[in-house]
Image (cartoon, rainbow, N blue to C red):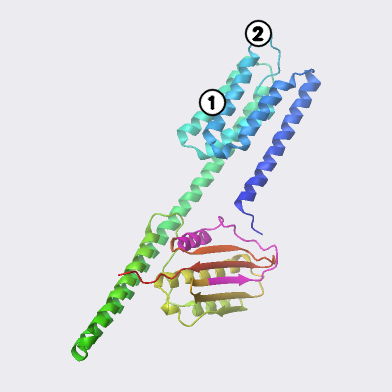
């Protein structure tokens, strides 16, 4: 069962908070046993502040990192005061919070800013080593800093590769959209040409019906403009736009081809698909194609698949439902470019798309609703 991103962040932050709490408690216990008295208070309070900043880092990654580094620097300066005998800081718990802040900055911020924050963390460790050269705390802090920077760089590289892959997919899909734009223009112009030819015949035989024929040509032109504008919107530089050009086959042929690989598949669709706007028809086709492909990849044990497409007053609705047993591996909504692209395309056309497990917990459902535009006022 797919888990929404919001809950993934909540769970990860809760786990990180628990890790911070354990680190602070271990540090407090170790200092109380070795130094005694209230020697642990300063380090514990500073660690709690830095770890708290690490937990809210997503709100402002730069300033939370800067604030955490400032707190760590302040603890080092306090240790330099005369007649102050305190354990070396930053301690391991604070170093762990700093590693999260620095790693997060390295992953997401611009290179110069990320490098400055990582460098500031390294300078703190150097200052700590200069103040307490015989302590084992600076090497531990250095190891934790290195782990944070390494994790941040690894995630930054992964994110960059994902963006590059998305860009490649988008470029290929924009070529498909350009082909669809050509097909839509040709479709509407062919209809207008036929109507113009018919108007010439009407002008010779029934001149009084010429205004009616011209009105039909005007309406066809308006429909063409609406369709072209909707497809041109998809050609704008939106992330992860989906492929658009329809195959020469219809839904029936697509489902029939799928049935050769997955025996029990049923299609319920009207026989007037050709009356839908071309951009809606192609989007419905692609949604069904992507959903059936995901069934083959992620739910090969599904006993049946139902494909339903219908048109009502609100527009065209298409749904693909399977009955795979619980536990089938499914892509999260950010896990594959296909569903991302479908969502972007559907929303650009003014519709909605949802994909997720069925309420019963058995099987998966992909459902999209696409509005069918009316004629523009003339």
Residue 82, disc: 2
Considering only vertical position in the picture, is 5 above or below 95?
A: below
Q: Quadrant of residue 249?
A: bottom left
**Front in this rendered view, residue 41 or 108:** 41
Q: Nearer the viewer, mark 2 or mark 1?
A: 2
Residue at (79, 20) in percent of width and height: 34
Span colored in magenta: 318-347
Q: Which residue is mark 1?
A: 120
For marks 2 and 1, give the CA distance: 25 Å
Q: Label 2: few (<14), some or many (≥20) within 10 Å?
A: few
* Number of marks in the rendered image: 2
Residue at (54, 77) in percent of width and height: 255
Q: Residue 359: where, in percent of width, then height? A: 67, 65
Q: Are marks 2 and 1 in contact (CB under 8 Å)?
A: no
**Which element is circle 2 on?**
loop
Q: Is residue 125 visible?
A: no
Q: Residue 322: where, in percent of width, then height? A: 63, 71
Which quadrant is the N terminus positioned in? bottom right
Q: Which of pointers 2 and 1 lies earlier in the amino acid sequence?
A: 2
Residue 251, disc: none
Q: Residue furthest bottom?
A: 205
Q: Is residue 167 visible?
A: yes
- For residue 339: magenta? yes
Q: Residue furthest left?
A: 204
């Amino acid at each position: 069962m797919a888990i929404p991103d919001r809950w993934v962040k909540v769970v990860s932050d809760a786990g990180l908070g628990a890790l911070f709490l354990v680190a602070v408690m271990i540090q407090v216990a170790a200092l109380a046993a070795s130094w005694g008295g209230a020697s642990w208070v300063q380090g514990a309070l500073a660690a709690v502040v830095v770890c708290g900043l690490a937990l809210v880092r997503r709100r402002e990654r730069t300033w939370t990192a800067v604030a955490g580094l400032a707190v760590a620097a302040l603890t080092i300066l306090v240790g330099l005061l005369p007649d102050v005998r305190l354990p070396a800081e930053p301690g391991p718990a604070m170093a762990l919070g700093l590693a999260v802040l620095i790693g997060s900055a390295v992953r997401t911020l611009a290179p110069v800013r990320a490098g400055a924050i990582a460098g500031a963390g390294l300078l703190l460790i150097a200052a700590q080593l200069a103040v307490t050269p015989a302590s084992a705390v600076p090497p531990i802090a250095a190891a934790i800093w290195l782990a944070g920077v390494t994790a941040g760089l690894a995630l930054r590289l992964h994110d960059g590769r994902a963006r590059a892959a998305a860009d490649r997919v988008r470029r290929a899909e924009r070529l498909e959209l350009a082909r669809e734009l050509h097909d839509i223009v040709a479709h509407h112009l062919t209809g207008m040409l036929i109507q113009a030819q018919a108007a010439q015949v009407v002008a010779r035989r029934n001149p009084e019906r010429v205004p009616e024929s011209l009105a039909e040509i005007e309406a066809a032109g308006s429909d063409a403009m609406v369709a072209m504008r909707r497809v041109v919107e998809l050609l704008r530089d939106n992330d992860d736009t989906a492929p658009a050009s329809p195959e020469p086959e219809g839904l029936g042929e697509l489902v029939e081809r799928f049935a050769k690989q997955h025996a029990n598949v049923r299609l319920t669709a009207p026989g007037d698909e050709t009356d839908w706007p071309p951009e809606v028809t192609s989007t419905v086709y692609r949604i069904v194609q992507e959903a059936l492909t995901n069934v083959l990849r992620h739910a090969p044990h599904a006993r049946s698949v139902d494909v339903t497409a219908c048109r009502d007053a609100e527009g065209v609705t298409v749904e693909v439902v399977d009955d795979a047993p619980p536990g089938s591996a499914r892509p999260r909504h950010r896990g594959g470019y296909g569903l991302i692209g479908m969502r972007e395309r559907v929303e650009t056309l003014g519709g909605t798309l949802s994909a997720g497990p069925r309420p019963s917990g058995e099987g998966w459902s992909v459902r999209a609703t696409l509005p069918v535009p009316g004629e523009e006022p003339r």
